[in-house]
Image (tube, rainbow, N blue to C red):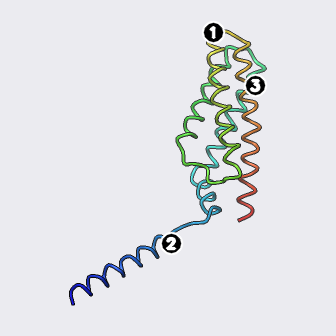
């Protein structure tokens, strides 16, 4: 008799656990909305602002490029530590943007540090490519959020 009770208890526990796990799952749209509202939007704005600043300072004397590029690299590091973007549509553009920002930012800092305008300018052009990739990612994210 005890083994029947034990088996029934184990079976009931397994079913309840399965229901809890299944009932707690969220849709990709809900995951994206959670990502967006729990910091994703802020990360995108910070990347947009700092990459835009790099683009803006590129028309000024090279001695201020380093600071703008370092600020962008700091934002890239924060974004890379955050949760994975849950939009399959936007993820590729997001990854390309972060890669371009990181590579371009590093080239900009290295070139500006050596007073090598060619290297620093190449880095800024890479950052500019990242800006277009970030814009594409944001467009995909907004499209996915609207489709919800």
Residue 48, by quadrant, is: top right
Where residue 73 appears, as percent x and y from the top left, is 60, 29
Q: Residue at x 64, y 36 (%)?
A: 98
Callout 2 secondary element: helix
Tell me whether the residue at label 1 lies in contact with that at label 2, contact meaning CB atoms closer than 8 angstroms: no
Q: Which residue is mark 1?
A: 114
Circles 2 and 3, Cβ within 8 Å, touching? The answer is no
Q: CA distance from mark 1 to mark 3?
A: 18 Å
Question: Foreground: 74 or 87?
Answer: 87
Q: Position of residue 36 (x, y in %)?
A: 63, 53
- Tell me if mark 1 has few (under 14), some (14-19) or many (20+) residues whose alpha carbon lies within 10 angstroms of its own: few
- Report the Cα–Cα distance between label 2 and label 3: 47 Å
Q: Residue at x 41, y 78 (%)?
A: 16
Q: Is residue 31 left or right of residue 90?
A: left
Quadrant for residue 126, please give it.
top right
> Which residue, given by chain and number where applicable, does mark 2 sit on?
22
């Amino acid at each position: 008799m005890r083994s029947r009770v034990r088996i029934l208890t184990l079976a009931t526990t397994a079913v309840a656990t399965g229901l809890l796990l299944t009932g707690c799952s969220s849709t990709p749209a809900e995951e994206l909305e959670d990502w967006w509202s729990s910091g994703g939007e802020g990360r995108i704005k910070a990347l947009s602002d700092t990459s835009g600043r790099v683009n803006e300072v590129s028309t000024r004397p090279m001695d201020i490029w380093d600071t703008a590029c370092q600020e962008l690299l700091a934002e890239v590091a924060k974004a890379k530590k955050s949760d994975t973007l849950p939009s399959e549509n936007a993820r590729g553009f997001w990854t390309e943007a972060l890669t371009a920002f990181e590579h371009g930012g590093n080239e900009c800092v290295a070139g500006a540090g050596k007073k090598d305008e060619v290297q620093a300018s190449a880095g800024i052009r890479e950052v500019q490519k990242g800006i277009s990739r970030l814009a594409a990612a944001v467009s995909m994210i907004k499209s996915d959020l609207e489709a919800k």
